[in-house]
Image (spheres, rainbow, N blue to C red):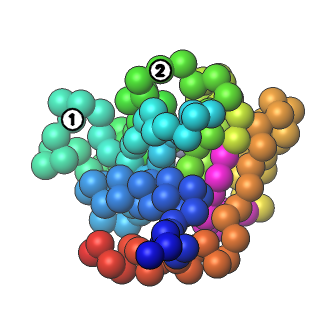
Amino acid sequence: MSHRIDVLSWDEYFMSMAHLSAKRSKDPNTQVGACIVNKDKRVVGLGYNGFPMGCDDELFPWQRDGQYLQTKYPFVVHAELNAILNSIQNLEGCTIYVSLFPCNECAKAIIQSGIKKVVYESDKYNGTENNIASKKMFDHAHVEYIQLKETVEVNVKILKGGIE
Ligand SMILES: [Zn+2]
């Protein structure tokens, strides 16, 4: 019997881990996951969007609208930053897989951590000032960013359906 050929590609495998992590998010509107991988293809960090330790989801708001302190924005830690902070080693030269293109704050953290490549799926904020700022910083810092091909996205979607 020969080996299986329809195995997950590395990109599908790591993006699937990002999606699995996103399932831990308690945000009712946006669930984002991130997976950091080193040069040896070992996972060294996982994260999803959530409140900091000790900040109870029952006490902090997930709302998007209203007065600033009544919204999630001052409190939430994005998936990318959580993955960096949860990582177990120096991230120099690592790749981060993330389901949504990083915001400007996460872009700063990605650059400063030494991560050199961003693999993303959705870029739904493409063209916004925040998104342009992220790309400008990545370009100057020589952080490569590539969108996963459609075929991979389809496979990941099938997987997502499979684990729900
Ligand atoms: Zn962010």
Q: Position of residue 58 (x, y in %)?
A: 13, 49
Instruction: Determine whether the residue tagged by mark 2 lies in a helix, strand or loop.
Output: loop
Would residue 65 be visible to someone looking at this image? Answer: no
Q: Position of residue 5 (x, y in %)?
A: 54, 73
Taking the image in four quarters, ligand 1 sits in the one at: top right
Say if the magenta span includes residue 56: no
> What amino acid is at disc 2?
Gln
Magenta span of residues = 118-126
36 above or below 28? Answer: above
Q: Look at 35% across and 53% down and name the residue there.
A: 21
Q: What residue is shown with label 1? A: 55
Q: Is residue 132 left or right of residue 32?
A: right
Instruction: Determine whether the residue tagged by mark 1 lies in a helix, strand or loop.
Output: loop
- Work out whether residue 85 or residue 148 is closer to the camera in this orientation and state it: 148
Say if the magenta span includes residue 120: yes
Q: Is residue 25 left or right of residue 79?
A: left
Toward the front, the furthest residue is 1
Q: What residue is shown with label 2? A: 89
Quarter of the image where the N terminus is located: bottom left
Mark 1: give few (<14), some (14-19) or many (20+) Cα within 10 Å: few
